[in-house]
Image: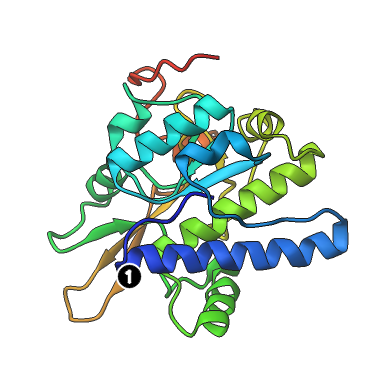
Amino acid sequence: MLPLAGTNDAAATSRLGVQLGVDEAKHAAGLFGGSIELLQVTQSSLGDRQLSAVVGSDSIDGCLASARAAERAGIAFMNLSCPSDSLRGRDCQATMFHVAPSDEMYRDALAQANAPADAKAAAWDPSLTRFGADTLNERFRSRFGRAMTADAWLGWVAIKILWESSLRARSTDSRMLMQYMVRDGTRFDGHKGRPLSFRVWDHQLRQPLYVVSSADGSTRVIAEMPATGSDEESSRDVLDRLGTTAARSACRMSP
């Protein structure tokens, strides 16, 4: 794991989400076998350790530098914080996986919701209750005494994805994990009501977003985007309404 950079609240809650994910993975390891260990490493030391993945939160330049270091070492880099479209486009990396939504996904969610000027789009909200979100929010609050923000959810789900990929691929080898994460039939549950998956063309995690408004002085979710599709549309097709499509993507990853 690379240091989750910064001293602000977002970086702090991201760390807590990662920690909850590790705690729960360790509990699952006791039931299914295996183990998980969280290490803090630097970019220069990535090649010195046998790592399954790197989890990082940083500035855009920091994310890109970390992703390039991880690619040189042949290790998956899970981007928790950088929404920059360029990281999914001209600066994409074959071993970089974007758990954080992209800027274009946020813009699409707001545009499709016809949201008021004060609204913002988010990957998670502590008021969510459906699809097991209430129990996840409560686990986080009980563990850390604070609300589970979007930054915390992104940290938690990144670890969940890595643990489940290792369990199902029956391997801790990073190459095997990356192959599993982009496999056509791979699905992950993030308590959002739709199966989550990585796009093969830019390694962006498909996921619903929430439009949040604070117009009346209290923050509340006013919409979930994208809206439910027709019976003929797959969940992937619906989720691909947010973000860059394969046809428009500038990402050209080396195999």
Above or below: residue 239 compared with residue 154:
above
Q: Nearer the viewer, residue 146 or 191?
A: 146
Q: Is residue 236 left or right of residue 67?
A: right
Q: Residue at x 35, y 49 (%)?
A: 58
Above or below: residue 242 compared with residue 153:
above
Q: Is residue 195 left or right of residue 84?
A: right
Q: Which residue is mark 1?
A: 9
Q: Residue 230: percent from the left, percent from the top? A: 49, 40
Amino acid type, mark 1? Asp
Q: Residue at x 71, y 30 (%)?
A: 176
Q: Is residue 23 left or right of residue 97?
A: right
Q: Residue at x 15, y 64 (%)?
A: 118
Q: Residue 128: percent from the left, percent from the top? A: 46, 71
Residue 91 at least partly seen:
yes
Above or below: residue 63 compared with residue 253:
below
Residue 189 at least partly seen:
no
The colour scheme applied to this rendered structure is rainbow
Callout 1: helix, strand or loop? helix
Q: Residue 34: percent from the left, percent from the top? A: 83, 53
